[in-house]
């Protein structure tokens, strides 16, 4: 790995729903042969990854996706003029479509990426997963779009049974055991993520997740699998254990082949008591638990950088170790008011020029 400037988005670290960016940066930083510079990109001035010197050499704010692609492109140009970015790794669902649409302009600046295109992203949208699952020969829980809370008080007449899962377009999910709980979750999620909100029939089972890299030709590489052992109130993994699950691997291979997926992804499935796999989500980026890939000896962010740099992956990708566990934790980072003011006023902070 040559001396690279790698920009990584998603530097937020909410304990109940952290972004993947910090974990991606940590995987790169701890690679034996990494001597480059990591530039953290995020959307909120209090996202802690922007200030963590251990993981990022510099941090910069991006405009929220709602500001539009022109604003994103102009901001990237300004950051690139200062940092000379070699590789960009987006890590958040809501931003991927904008980056995908801007890919020709980004590459013309000399920045390399490996991203799914707009069509691939749309095919794995939560509201289209039933079609994708059907094409790949997979099971998928009954799902519908909802635009008003009244649905939850009438849905039993249409064959729906509680509990139901109420899900946002990009993030967030809640299990509701009655109409009042569902309506409350609907209003909260719609307020944050907009309409429509998705409603899914709850499936009793054990959740198993897989993360890997699609080569854009239908191949899946470096698969790391994890079974959740403890959850936050948003259903995110607070602890998990590395596993090998042949059924999940075959499911993921079918999906990647169907999509001809390019870049990182996470496949989430539920395995019921009868051993049937239900597709729950396909996330178009590395998961927040991606540091486990480093811990089990198959460092996926580094493999992604290798693929972007050389156009190929090593023939001997390490086999992930099974039976290793991660436990997430929260901690404080202490910064100066000058650092905070730099981020607030100028939208950026160079850690290498900041005094201790």
Image: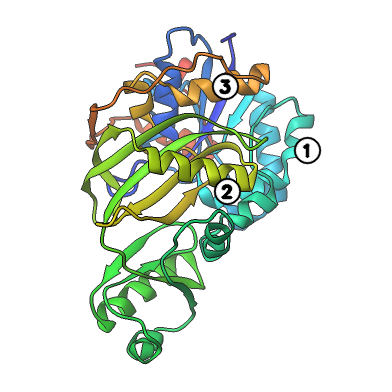
**Residue pictured at 28% horizontal, 45% vertical:** 237
Left or right for 87, reference 56? right
Left or right for 222, reference 326? right
SS at mark 1?
A: helix
What residue does disc 2 label? Answer: 95
Q: Say whether residue 287 is visible.
A: no
Left or right for 244, reference 262? left
Q: Are marks 3 and 1 in contact (CB under 8 Å)?
A: no
Q: Say whether residue 309 is visible.
A: yes
**Residue pictured at 51% horizontal, 61% vertical:** 126
Percent x, y for residue 333? 28, 31
What residue does disc 1 label? Answer: 104
What residue does disc 3 label? Answer: 305
Percent x, y for residue 323? 23, 28
**Residue pictured at 38% horizontal, 37% vertical:** 246
- Quarter occupied by the N terminus: top right
Image quadrant in which you'd find residue 220? top right
SS at mark 3?
A: helix
Percent x, y for residue 83? 62, 22
- Mark 3 or 2, nearer chain start: 2
Left or right for 169, reference 81? left
Q: Is residue 292 above or below residue 34?
A: below
Percent x, y for residue 270? 34, 54
- Mark 3 or 1, nearer chain start: 1
Query: In terms of depth relative to the viewer, which is nearer, 54 or 298?
Result: 298
Q: Is residue 136 above or below residue 182?
A: above
């Amino acid at each position: 790995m040559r001396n690279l400037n790698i920009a990584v988005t998603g530097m937020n670290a909410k304990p109940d729903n952290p972004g993947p960016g910090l974990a991606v940066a940590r995987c790169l930083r701890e690679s034996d042969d990494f001597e480059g510079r990591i530039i953290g990109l995020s959307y909120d001035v209090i996202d802690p990854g922007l200030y963590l010197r251990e993981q990022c050499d510099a941090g910069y704010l991006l405009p929220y996706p709602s500001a539009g692609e022109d604003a994103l492109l102009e901001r990237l140009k300004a950051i690139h003029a200062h940092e000379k970015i070699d590789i960009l790794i987006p890590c958040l669902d809501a931003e991927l479509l904008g980056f995908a649409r801007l890919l020709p302009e980004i590459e013309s600046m000399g920045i390399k990426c490996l991203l799914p295109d707009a069509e691939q992203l749309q095919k794995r949208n939560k509201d289209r997963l039933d079609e994708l699952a059907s094409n790949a020969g997979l099971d998928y829980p009954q799902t519908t779009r909802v635009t008003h809370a009244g649905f939850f008080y009438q849905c039993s007449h249409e064959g729906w049974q509680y509990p139901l899962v109420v899900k946002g377009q990009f993030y967030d999910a809640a299990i509701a055991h009655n109409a009042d709980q569902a309506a409350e979750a609907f209003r909260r999620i719609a307020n944050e993520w907009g309409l429509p909100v998705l409603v899914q029939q709850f499936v009793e089972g054990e959740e198993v997740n897989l993360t890997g890299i699609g080569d854009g030709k239908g191949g899946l590489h470096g698969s790391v699998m994890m079974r959740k052992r403890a959850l936050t109130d948003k259903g995110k993994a607070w602890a998990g254990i590395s596993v090998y699950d042949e059924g999940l691997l075959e499911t993921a291979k079918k999906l990647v082949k169907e999509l001809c997926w390019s870049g990182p992804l996470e496949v989430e499935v539920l395995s019921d008591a009868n051993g049937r796999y239900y597709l729950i989500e396909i996330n178009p980026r590395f998961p927040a638990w991606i540091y486990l890939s480093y811990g089990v000896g198959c460092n996926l962010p580094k493999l992604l950088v290798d693929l972007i740099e050389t156009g190929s992956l090593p023939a001997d990708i390490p086999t992930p170790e099974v039976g290793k566990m991660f436990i997430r934790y929260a901690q404080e980072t202490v910064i100066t008011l000058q650092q905070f003011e730099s981020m607030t006023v100028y939208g950026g902070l160079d850690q290498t020029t900041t005094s201790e």
